[in-house]
Image (spheres, helix red, strand yellow):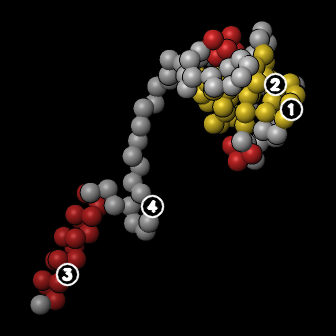
Amino acid sequence: MKKISIAAILALAISANASGFTGGNAPANQGGFLGGHSGANSVKVALDAKDDTLVTVKGKILSQVAHEKYKFSDGKDTIIIEIDDEDWGGLSVGPDETVTIYGEVDGNTIRANEIDVKRITK
């Protein structure tokens, strides 16, 4: 009887491991696309882009213009960006520091397009 129980437990453990079970409540790594995207990579392109276009732009945050809204420049053009408080991820940035913002164009604003930042890095 003990041999059957041990064999059943061993078979279950091997089966669970083969199916991607990582133990505990942690999900298995699902992976994803590692390449870039074909979205805007400059403020000028973002200003003219359609709503929800993905963007990755390097530049500087020049000033805060409202709660969660900032003036951003890539050195040539400026645009308003929105960074939700929770999207800063503990990062502190001064006006002389270059950052990379990742987000999408918000073309539903009254004035020019804005960028809704999802992630920011130094």
| Rendering quarter of residue 67 | top right
Amino acid found under the numbered disc labelled 3? Ile
Work out which quarter of the rendered image holds the C terminus and state it.
Answer: top right
The image quadrant that residue 71 belongs to is top right
Estimate the spatial distance between the alpha carbons at disc 3 and disc 2, rounded to whole Å.
Answer: 65 Å
Q: Amino acid at mark 1?
A: Gln
Give the x, y percent position of residue 11: 18, 70
Q: CA distance from mark 3 to mark 4?
A: 26 Å
Name the residue type under label 2.
Lys
Q: Say which mark, if any, is on residue 111.
A: none
- Residue with the mark numbered 3: 6
Residue drawn 22% across the image and 70% down it: 12
Real-space Cα distance between discs 1 and 4? 39 Å
Which image quadrant: the N terminus?
bottom left
Label whose residue precedes the other's in the sequence (3 or 1): 3
The mark lying in front, picked from 4 and 2, is 2
